[in-house]
């Protein structure tokens, strides 16, 4: 009888990244989180400027969660739940569009409507920026905001992102094409921004596909 080779655990999955701020935490989603993500993202206001949603069936957040390990492995997306100690998951933030040669990534996030204007977005951005610049070796973060999404534009500018211009016809949502404002933050600007002042700790092993340069610190 042939022996079955033992399955070697993937270090970055057996020791997952966890990022902690003064109040909130970032962690990977599990299938147990699907009902909460469904509740948050059935709101059309939350998903208005995204190419997906609003959710209409529980299978949609389940499919999203099931796809995440492979996307972490390939370097496509590094998404986290934004978790409040009292309320549980309140949204998602993450990194995508990784360019190892240029040491850059794109940051995106969304929060449930109830937490808009609560300060949660600032803390979530501070945590994901600290992970990018301190641990992954990123030297530039890019962020997009729909030209009609003034709230998102103002939020990015308040935390230190620099408006760099408008990209016409940049995002396709089904049959519709949208213009976006492009924002950037370099590592040196992050060190001078309000995000850098937020106390952040990082635990766990990053997926190798997202290590784009030498880590500045732990």
Image: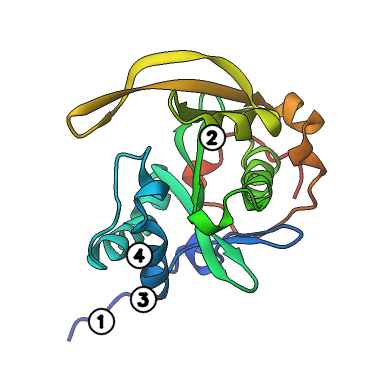
Disc 3/disc 2 C-alpha distance (Å) = 48 Å
Mark nearer the viewer, 3 or 1: 3
Mark nearer the viewer, 1 or 4: 4
Quarter of the figure with residue 152? top right
- Residue in the picture at 56% in, 14% down: 164
Q: Position of residue 95 (x, y in %)?
A: 50, 42
Disc 1/disc 4 C-alpha distance (Å) = 42 Å
Q: Earlier in the sequence, mark 3 or mark 4?
A: 3
Q: Is residue 151 left or right of residue 25?
A: left
Disc 3/disc 4 C-alpha distance (Å) = 36 Å
Disc 1/disc 2 C-alpha distance (Å) = 56 Å
Mark nearer the viewer, 3 or 4: 4
The residue beneath circle 4 is 38
The residue beneath circle 3 is 6
| Label 1 residue SS | loop
| Label 2 residue SS | helix
Q: Position of residue 210 (x, y in %)?
A: 51, 42
Mark nearer the viewer, 3 or 2: 2
- Residue in the picture at 36% in, 72% down: 35
The residue beneath circle 1 is 3
Residue 152 circle label: 2
Q: Earlier in the sequence, mark 1 or mark 2?
A: 1
Disc 2/disc 4 C-alpha distance (Å) = 22 Å
Please name whichever residue, 129 or 164, is drawn nearer the observer in this view of the structure. Answer: 164
Q: How is the image coloured?
A: rainbow
Q: Position of residue 113 (x, y in %)?
A: 49, 54
Q: Earlier in the sequence, mark 1 or mark 4?
A: 1
In the rendered image, the vertical position of residue 65 relative to residue 135, given as above or below: below
Quarter of the figure with residue 171? top left
**Is disc 3 in contact with disc 4, using a CB cutoff of under 8 Å?**
no
């Amino acid at each position: 009888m042939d022996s079955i080779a033992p399955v070697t655990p993937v270090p970055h999955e057996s020791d997952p990244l966890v990022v902690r701020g003064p109040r909130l935490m970032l962690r990977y989603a599990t299938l147990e989180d699907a009902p909460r993500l469904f509740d948050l993202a059935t709101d059309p206001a939350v998903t208005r400027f995204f190419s997906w949603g609003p959710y209409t069936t529980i299978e949609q957040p389940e499919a999203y969660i099931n796809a995440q390990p492979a996307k972490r492995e390939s370097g496509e997306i590094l998404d986290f739940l934004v978790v409040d100690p009292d309320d549980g998951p309140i949204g998602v933030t993450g990194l995508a569009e990784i360019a190892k040669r240029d040491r850059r990534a794109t940051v995106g996030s969304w929060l449930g409507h109830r937490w808009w204007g609560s300060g949660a977005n600032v803390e979530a951005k501070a945590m994901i920026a600290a992970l990018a610049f301190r641990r992954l070796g990123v030297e530039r973060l890019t962020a997009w905001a729909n030209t009609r999404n003034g709230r998102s534009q103002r939020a990015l500018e308040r935390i230190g992102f620099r408006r760099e211009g408008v990209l016409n016809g940049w995002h396709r949502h089904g049959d519709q094409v949208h213009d976006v404002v492009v924002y950037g933050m370099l590592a040196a600007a992050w060190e001078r921004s309000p995000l850098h002042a937020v106390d952040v700790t990082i635990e766990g092993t990053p997926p190798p596909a997202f290590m784009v340069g030498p880590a500045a610190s732990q």
